Image (cartoon, rainbow, N blue to C red):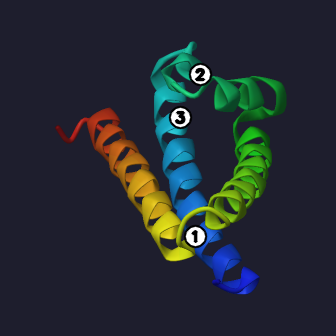
Amino acid sequence: MISLKVLLIIFVIIIAADKLLTLWNMQILANNNPNYLQAEKNIAARWFFGKFGLIGGTILFGMLTLISLLVVYYSFSFVFNPYKVLWVIFVIYGFTIANNSYYLIKNMGLI
């Protein structure tokens, strides 16, 4: 099994990439649209943004995401190969980061 330190580093990097891209997207949308929070498709993230502000909500939701991801990883690692579980997480976050990057480029007006 992968050590907890390595998992934390990996998960913090991919979660930080996701959250920073989301934050950047929201800040761009906030300049032009008073209802910019509606652009966030994740209902839980939208709730955190509404309750704690954009930066505070991002930080708190990122911590919740990290805890959830660790629980999911360890839960699935008992049933499946831990490396396969990690690869599934990479694929899911890869799509998420690619989607956030696409919308960032779109919201910046580059495409």
Q: Which residue is identified by label 1? A: 13
Residue neighbourhood size for the residue with mark 1, other residues' Cα within 10 Å, grouped as few (<14), some (14–19), many (≥20):
few
Residue 71 relative to residue 32: left or right: right
Q: Position of residue 30 (x, y in %)?
A: 54, 27
- Quadrant of image for the N terminus: bottom right
Residue 111 relative to residue 82: left or right: left
SS at badge 2: helix
Residue 37, disc:
2
Q: Of the residues shown, which amino acid type is indicated by label 3?
A: Met
Q: Residue at x 53, y 34 (%)?
A: 26
Q: Of the residues shown, which amino acid type is indicated by label 1?
A: Ile
Name the residue nearer the viewer: 42 or 91. 91
Q: Where is residue 77, by image quadrant?
A: bottom right
Labels 3 & 2 near each other (Cβ < 8 A): yes
Q: Residue at x 71, y 58 (%)?
A: 75
Classify 58 as above or below 76.
above
Q: Which residue is identified by label 3? A: 26
Name the residue nearer the viewer: 81 or 42. 81
Q: Position of residue 58 (x, y in %)?
A: 70, 44
Q: Residue at x 57, y 70 (%)?
A: 13
